[in-house]
Image (cartoon, grey):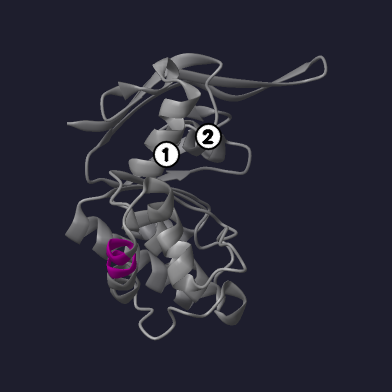
């Protein structure tokens, strides 16, 4: 069963009178449980495609389904609910809330979902243990290393039990050893939880760990 199905996805940005085609006629199938990397040079359309898959942006033309639901047919509220409950995000810059502790950052998604206090705390502690952050639950992002912050971001992404996690250059700000450990962690979560992971990356180490590569060039899938 396909977790993601895209047909002829095209995204054109307009700047004054200039049109920039970021994606052109992209067809893509991603099966449930895949561990896949979008690769290609800067400007190839990787981040644009990732943003479309996450419902953070809208295609100029084409159609996109996640879990058999067509994103283009959903209201803004339905899209927001889809992102909250079914899709997790891991960003290059971590995007943690600096005034909240690690556990509070992880709990925040569940707070928005309306999960009860004790259940939120139980699940947040369990997932922080799962990503190797036992004992660091009450540290704020500024008191954590880059690798630890990204692990908090991964914990936040998976705690809501999404079917799909999208990671935009997740190792870009990490040294090679920390980045490799993070990828091994996400690979393990993919295997144990069955979550589909889709990365955009320039990093050869990430490419080596992916089970499938989708190559983009000039906004098109070329392999």
Residue 15: where, in percent of width, then height? 78, 22
**Contact (CB < 8 A) between labels 2 and 1?**
yes
The residue labelled by disc 1 is 83
What is the spatial separation of the Cα atoms under label 2 and label 1, in whole angstroms? 9 Å
Q: Is residue 174 above or below residue 75?
A: below
Residue 222: where, in percent of width, then height? 44, 30
Q: Quadrant of residue 163?
A: top left
Q: Secondary structure at mark 2?
A: loop
Q: Residue at x 28, y 69 (%)?
A: 122
**For the residue carrying disc 2, how many other residues have a C-alpha within 10 Å: few (<14), some (14-19), or many (20+)?**
few
| Residues in magenta, as a range | 118-123
Q: Is residue 179 visible?
A: no
Q: Quadrant of residue 38?
A: top left
Toward the bottom, the furthest residue is 135
Q: Is residue 204 above or below residue 68?
A: below
Residue 218: where, in percent of width, then height? 58, 30
The residue labelled by disc 2 is 56
Q: Which residue is nearer to you in this view: 30 or 88?
A: 88
Q: Which quadrant: the C terminus?
A: top left
Toward the right, the furthest residue is 16
Q: Which residue is nearer to you in this view: 220 or 151?
A: 151
219 with respect to 34 (left or right): right
């Amino acid at each position: 069963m396909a977790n993601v199905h895209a047909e002829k996805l095209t995204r054109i940005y307009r700047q004054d009178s200039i049109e920039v085609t970021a994606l052109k006629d992209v067809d893509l199938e991603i099966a449930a449980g895949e561990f896949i990397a979008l690769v290609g040079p800067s400007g190839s359309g990787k981040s644009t495609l990732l943003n479309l898959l996450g419902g953070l942006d809208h295609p100029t033309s084409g159609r996109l389904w996640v879990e058999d639901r067509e994103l283009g047919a959903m209201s803004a509220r339905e899209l927001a609910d889809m992102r909250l409950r079914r899709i997790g995000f891991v960003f290059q810059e971590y995007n943690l809330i600096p005034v909240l502790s690690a556990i509070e950052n992880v709990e925040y998604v569940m707070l928005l979902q309306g999960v009860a206090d004790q259940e939120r705390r139980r699940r947040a502690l369990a997932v922080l243990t799962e990503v190797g952050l036992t004992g660091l639950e009450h540290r704020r992002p500024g008191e954590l290393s880059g690798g630890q912050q990204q692990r908090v971001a991964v914990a936040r992404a998976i705690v809501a039990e999404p079917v799909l996690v999208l990671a935009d250059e997740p190792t870009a700000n990490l040294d090679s050893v920390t980045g490799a450990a993070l990828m091994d962690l996400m690979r393990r979560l993919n295997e144990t939880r069955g979550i589909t992971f889709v990365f955009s990356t320039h990093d050869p180490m990430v490419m080596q760990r992916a089970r499938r590569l989708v190559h983009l060039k000039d906004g098109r899938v070329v392999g």
